[in-house]
Amino acid sequence: MSEEFTLNIEESNAPHAPPKVDYGAVPASATGGFSSNLASSPYHPVTPQNLLPSPSIPYKPLTVQMQQDLSSAECDAVASVQTMADECELGFRETNQSITADPAKDLYKAMYEWIDLNQNVFVSRLAEAVAIPSVSGDPTLRPRVLQTVAWATKWCESLGGVTEPVDLGLQTLPDGSRIVRPPALFATFESTLPDVPTLCVYGHLDVQPASKEDGWDTEPFQLTEKDGNLYGRGATDDKGPVLCWLWFVEFHRKFNLPLPCNLKCVFEGMEESGSEGLEECLKSVSETFFHDVDGICISDNYWMGLERPCVTWGIRGNVYFAVEVRGGTKDLHSGAHGGAVQEPMTDLIKIMSTLVDSATGKILVPGIYDEVDELTEEEKERYERCDFDVASYANEDTGGMPLLSQDKATILMARSRYPTLSLHGIEGAFAGAGAKTVIPRTVVGKFSIRTVPHMTIDHVAECVKRHVVKVFDTLGSKNRLKVNVIHAGKPWMGDLNGYNYRAAAAATKQVWGVEPDYTREGGSIPITLTFEEVSGGKPAILLPIGQGDDGAHSQNEKISRRNYIVGAKTLGTYVYEFSRMTQEEKAKH
C-alpha cells in the first residue's frame, strides 16, 4: 500500500577626526609580503601548537539550569542572546598598531601590514570561536549555538555596530517536540563618508557535528595548529570567513578610518540545518534592512585546488528525501519470523538500489535531467583551465575512494555542473558493532539530490515521488510507504560581467597576484537566491578563502594559516573594490 505526501518542515567614538583617504588609489606596494607557496610563506610556523583558551564566554560552561532554559520552547531566544552578550568578555582584544604605512597615503598597504602584524591575534580569536560547539543539528547543543550568536553580537557591539538579534521562531524536531531556533544576528556598520554604497555580507555561526571518536586526529572544538594548518570544526566552514569581515571593521576602528561603504551583516545559526526560518525573516525586512543594499557577498565555499583562488558564480541546490517503509508495531527476531513476513528493509533496499547508477553516477530517476541546461563550449573551457589536481584529489581529498572518471573537467563538472544523487543512510537499521539478528519494524532511507540552476524543487520532488511509488508498487508489498521532503534549497547562478564580480576579481588579483578561476560550487548555500530577491535583484557573489582540501563537514576540518590571514586581506580589499566599482556603475546611469 503506497502513500505519497510531502512533509512541510516547519562609528567610531574616537576623539579626533578620521584622516581623509583616497579609496580609489591602489598602490603597487599593496600586494603584501606573502608567498603563494604555503611551505615557504610567513604563515607557516615551525612548531605545532594547541591554542590556549581566553577568559571569554566560550570557555565558561553553561549551568544545567541555563541549558534547560535555553532548550525550552518557552525560551525568549532574543533576550537570552542579548543577556549573554552583555555578560560576555571577548578575549584577545589587544592588537598591535605599530605599522609603518600611513593609512591616509597607502590604505591597502596599511591594512595588509596590520593584518600580518596581528596574525597571531587573528588565530587566537578563531580558536575562541571554534571552542563553542555550535552544532545546530544537535538539539542538546542548541544553547551553545545561542551562545555563539551572543559572542558575535558582543564583538559587533564593541566595534560600534548597531546589532539586532532577530527571532526565528521554533523548530519542530522529528519526535514532535519543539525547540527555539537561534536568532539571526543583523549588524550594521555605517560609514561616515557621503553617498557611499551599501554591502551586505552573510555568514553562519553554526557547525556540523564532530567528535574525536569520529576519526579526528585532534579535538575538533580545540583549534590546533600543525604544519601551517588550523584544525577545528568551523575553522573554514564558516567561522573563519565570518571573523575576517569583522577584522576588516576592526582595522578601521583601530585607526579611526571611515568605512569605504556601509556594511550590513547577517550571521545565522541554522545554516547547517537548512537555514530554517531565515528566508521568511529576510523577506519580512526586505523594505527596511535591505532597502539600500547594493550587493551581497557570501564567503562560505572553497577553492577548487590548493594554490589558485577562485570566484564562484553558481551553486547547486539540495533536495533531501526520506523514504519510510513501515511494517508492524515492533521489531522481530529473524530466526522466529524471517521468511514469514514482508520485511521493510528488503523493500527499502530495492527502492534505493534504483535511484543512481553506481558505475557512472547517473541519476536513474526519470525526468530528473529535463531542466538541466546544455553545456556550452565556453563553460567547458573554464573547467579545463581550473587549478585542480586529479591525483591529489583521488589520494587525499576523497580518502582513496575510487573515482568515476580520471578526466579533470569531467570530475569538476560532476562536482558542480550537473545534478547528483547520494545515498546517506538508513534510520532504524542496526548499525552497531557485532551482530544483531533483528528485523526492524520501520526503516527510513535518507538521500539527497544536488540540483543545478533552473532545476525546480517541485519538479525534482515530483519526479522522485513518482519513481519511488512506482518501484514500490511493483514489489507487491503490503508494507506502508511514505516519501518525505525533509528540507530543500534552491540553486543559484550569478552574473560574471556585473560590478560585484568585477570587484571580487580585482580584489583577488590585487592580493594574490593571479587571475582567479571562475567556478561553480557543488555544495549548497540555500539562502543565496533569497538575498538577491529581498534586495530587489541586487547581485550576489561567492568569494571563498578556503582551499579545496579544507575538509568542511569531514574529519580534520581545517583552514591554513596562510589562507585565513591572506583571506582577511582579500575580503577587505574586496570591500574597497566593491565601493569603487559600485559608485562607478551608478555614475553610468
Image (cartoon, rainbow, N blue to C red):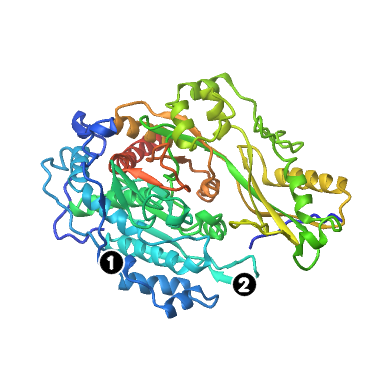
Q: Which mark is residue 200?
A: none
Q: Is residue 494 visible?
A: no
Please tell me whether residue 23 is drawn above or below residue 338 in the rendered image.
Answer: above
Residue at 28%, 56% in the rendered image: 125
Residue at 36%, 39% in the rendered image: 578
Q: Which of pointers 2 and 1 lies earlier in the amino acid sequence? A: 1
Q: Percent from the top left, x then y, of residue 515?
A: 36, 26
Q: Is residue 101 visible?
A: yes
- 191 displayed left or right of 525: left
Quadrant containing the C terminus in the rendered view: top left
Q: Viewer-proximal residue, 183 or 41? A: 41
Q: Viewer-proximal residue, 346 or 85? A: 346
Crowdedness near tag 2: few (<14), some (14–19) or many (≥20) residues, C-alpha within 10 Å: few
Quadrant containing the N terminus in the rendered view: bottom right
Tell me the CA gap for discs 2 and 1: 32 Å
Residue at 20%, 48% in the rendered image: 118
Q: Secondary structure at mark 1?
A: loop
Q: For the residue marked with disc 2, what is the amino acid?
A: Ser
Q: For the residue marked with disc 1, what is the amino acid?
A: Ser
Q: Percent from the top left, x then y, of residue 318?
A: 60, 46
Q: Determine contact: label 2, label 1, CB under 8 Å.
A: no
Q: Percent from the top left, x then y, of residue 311?
A: 43, 34
Q: Percent from the top left, x then y, of residue 277?
A: 56, 61
Crowdedness near tag 1: few (<14), some (14–19) or many (≥20) residues, C-alpha within 10 Å: some
| Residue farthest along the front direction in this orientation | 335
Please tell me whether residue 530 is drawn above or below residue 441 in the rendered image.
Answer: above
- 540 displayed left or right of 339: left
Q: Secondary structure at mark 2?
A: loop
* Residue beneath disc 1: 56
State how many labels appear.
2
Residue at 40%, 38% in the rendered image: 586
Q: Which mark is residue 177?
A: 2
